[in-house]
Image (tube, rainbow, N blue to C red):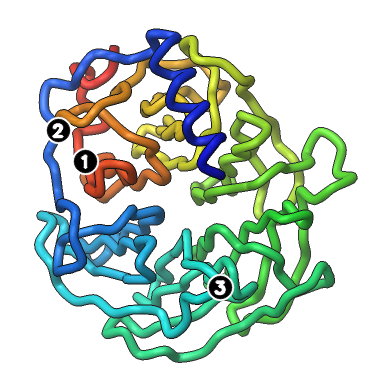
Amino acid sequence: MGGLIALAAWLAATSAGCGEATPSEARIIGQTGVGPREFNYPRGIAIDARRGQMWVVDKGGRIQCLSAAGEFVRGWRVPEIAAGRPIGLGVAPDGRVFVADTHYSRVMIYSPEGELLERFGENGAGPGQFLLPTDVAIDEDGFVYVAEYGGNDRISKFSPQLEFVLSFGGPGAGEASLRRPQRIAMDDGGLWVADSCNHRLVHFDRAGRFLGAFGSLGDGRGALRFPYGVGVLSDRTLVVCEYGNNRVQRFSRDGTSLGAWGGPGRRAGELAYPWAVGVDANDQVVVVDSGNNRLQVFAGLDPRAWH
């Protein structure tokens, strides 16, 4: 979002008194900087549960791989950043890293060691084209799902061979229409989309059929303000980070709020414009605390974290 929108979101969250109780424990990973395990406004995360690693992309165009404990493993920079930086990424079952290279209208695919293997996509509104891709998710069969905004505002599905399959959620899709789909989370029932500018979550099956949605603009329990990230816990409940409310909410699959975590601030357990959230194999929730240049980790199934 632009600076004025970000400022308005911060003021709205603060003045509305929507801060939530600090969780019993929140582990901080990283700090401001350009070195290993340091961040310059991190905006995307992908967790490789099979290998116990997490991948983070920041506004400097850097991609870092961290261990589950938060230790630096490796990192590299994307080749071009003059037009803008990536904001999302995903990890395939075989460990390849897919980067939504937002302002270059493409997806880049890297080996786990950082070798650029291939890229696909070009600027446009046609099948297989992108305007501003925001996120990538890969299912267990190797199908690739790419979210984008900028007028296309849709999800496109590609085969494991990167052949275009279908698009869904775009303008004219009725109740399934999206406005800046920011993140995708896969689960056994399909995929959940953080439909950020509609202030809701949308559920699709893997053939693009609309299964339902919940959420509306606000700062009360159950409402959402610019949901930028979504993840799925092992009990099939959802965790959603809200850029505009500086918090994480947990929801049942029918949209009932099960509690919240966070609130605006700089201390542990407080957030500044969170852009993304991930869930690891142990149900730890990793929040990309963008404005604080760090990650925060807490136990997602611990009832003490939700108030």
Position in image of residue 46 (x %, y %): 37, 59
- Kind of element beneath mark 1: strand
Position in image of residue 306 (x %, y %): 28, 18
- Left or right, residue 98 beside residue 28: right
First in residue order: circle 3 vs circle 2: 2
Q: Quadrant of residue 204?
A: top right
Residue at (47% x, 31% y) in the render: 7
Task: Name the kind of residue labelled 1 in the image.
Answer: Gln
Is residue 230 positioned above or below 47 on the image?
above
Q: Callout 3 environment at 10 Å: few (<14), some (14 to 19), or many (20+)?
A: few
Position in image of residue 183 (x %, y %): 53, 49
For the residue pair 185 and 265, the one nearer the viewer reads as 265
Residue at (68% x, 32% y) in the render: 198
Q: Quadrant of residue 59?
A: bottom left
| Mark identifier at residue 26 | 2
- Kind of element beneath mark 3: loop
User: What is the C-alpha distance between the residues marked 3 and 1?
Assistant: 29 Å
User: What is the C-alpha distance between the residues marked 3 and 2?
Assistant: 35 Å
Residues marked 3 and 1 touching at CB (< 8 Å)? no
Residue at (75% x, 71% y) in the render: 165
Is residue 257 positioned above or below 109 on the image?
above
- Left or right, residue 164 beside residue 81: right
For the residue pair 134 and 302, the one nearer the viewer reads as 134
Task: Name the kind of residue labelled 3 in the image.
Answer: Ala
Q: Quadrant of the N terminus?
A: top right
Residues marked 2 and 1 touching at CB (< 8 Å)? yes
The residue beneath circle 3 is 83
The residue beneath circle 1 is 296
- Kind of element beneath mark 2: loop
